[in-house]
Amino acid sequence: MNSITCWPVTPPAGRVEKFEYNAAHGQLSRYTAADGAEWQYRYDERGLLSNITDPAGQTWTQQCDERGLPVSLVSPQGEETRLAYTAQGLLSGIFRQDERRLGIEYDHHNRPETLTDVMGREHHTEYSGHDLPVKMRGPGGQSVRLRWQQHHKLSGLERTGTGAEGFRYDRHGNLLAWTDGNGVVWTMEYGPFDLPVARTDGEGHRWQYRYDKDTLQLTEVINPQGESYRYILDNCGRVTEERDWGGVVWRYRYDADGLCTARVNGLEETILYSRDAAGRLAEVITPEGKTQYAYDKSGRLTGIFSPDGTSQRTGYDERGG
């Protein structure tokens, strides 16, 4: 029997997650969330993933061919999806219940040339000598032509029935100007570290952006009227205050894991956020009352219970949808 290596991860707030690995191949064999929910992973003799079991006990299985490519995926309900490949190992088809859901044909350079969807409609792509797409044709006669500059940046785009669009870049590859299908030009300006510092729309309205010199995070947006929207950061780079165009202030508090626990709005009303053992949002307490959130074993949202007594419940079918 292969030995197991277990690594517990304990964030500052004390929510412990566990990762267990099989020593034979070093892959993850079990993940236990902070609330005790457990995912199991199993592998074949080659070390390839063969099945996954979720916290609710549902199992997905996978089979691979001699090349290690997955060729069969079976859901917990027994529904199989089959995958086909070319001799070069490129995906050529996806089949479900013996019906082709997707087909892909390649040219002699192994570039996707024709894609056939589940309705049997074909989508075609043509390429340049640099393997860049230059024309794409859809099933309804729609087409798109693309032009590229020497550094393989998109420089032009022309769709059926619309005007041509153009793109211009600086020497760092940042977009400087975009000309839309109506011939209207939008521009961008950049500062240190290629951060955008200004944007001018097609009508000449200019927006400006300011950043923290240490974290390079956005701290201020100045609109065309000269009004500022500011973000005040703490030493960890988290937003502690938010000040809108009119000077209204929102304040935020966080727990040791960096998750927001409270927000004080412009009316000095406090909104509290609490989480369950897995770190998921469990309660929101506002001046109007308490809203609660419920989840199933797999962590999917199953219910929202509002202060006025109303509730929203979410159910999932056998496919998880």
Image (cartoon, helix red, strand yellow):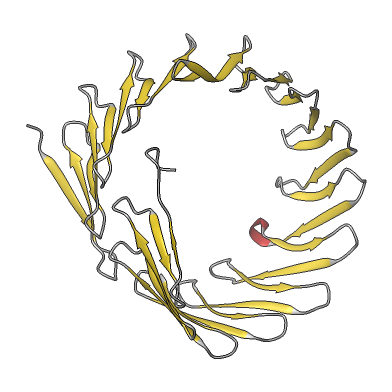
> Which sits in the foreground, 88 or 263?
263
Position in image of residue 254 (x %, y %): 41, 76
Position in image of residue 91 (x %, y %): 50, 19
Q: Which residue is drawn at 93% across and 46% down?
A: 183
Position in image of residue 280 (x %, y %): 37, 63
Q: Residue at x 79, y 30 (%)?
A: 146
Tell me the quadrant of the picture where the C terminus can be found: top left
Q: Hey, which residue is sitting farthest front in the picture?
A: 309
Q: Hey, which residue is sitting farthest right in the picture?
A: 183
Above or below for 50 versus 199: above
Position in image of residue 290 (x %, y %): 42, 78
> Which sits in the foreground, 90 or 194?
90
Q: Hey, which residue is sitting farthest left in the picture?
A: 1
Indicate left or right for 318 with 191 as reference.
left
Indicate left or right for 38 with 129 as reference.
left
- Number of numbered markers: 0
Quarter of the rendering containing residue 48: top left
> Which sits in the foreground, 100 or 32?
100
Tell me the quadrant of the picture where the N terminus can be found: top left
Above or below for 98 versus 20: above
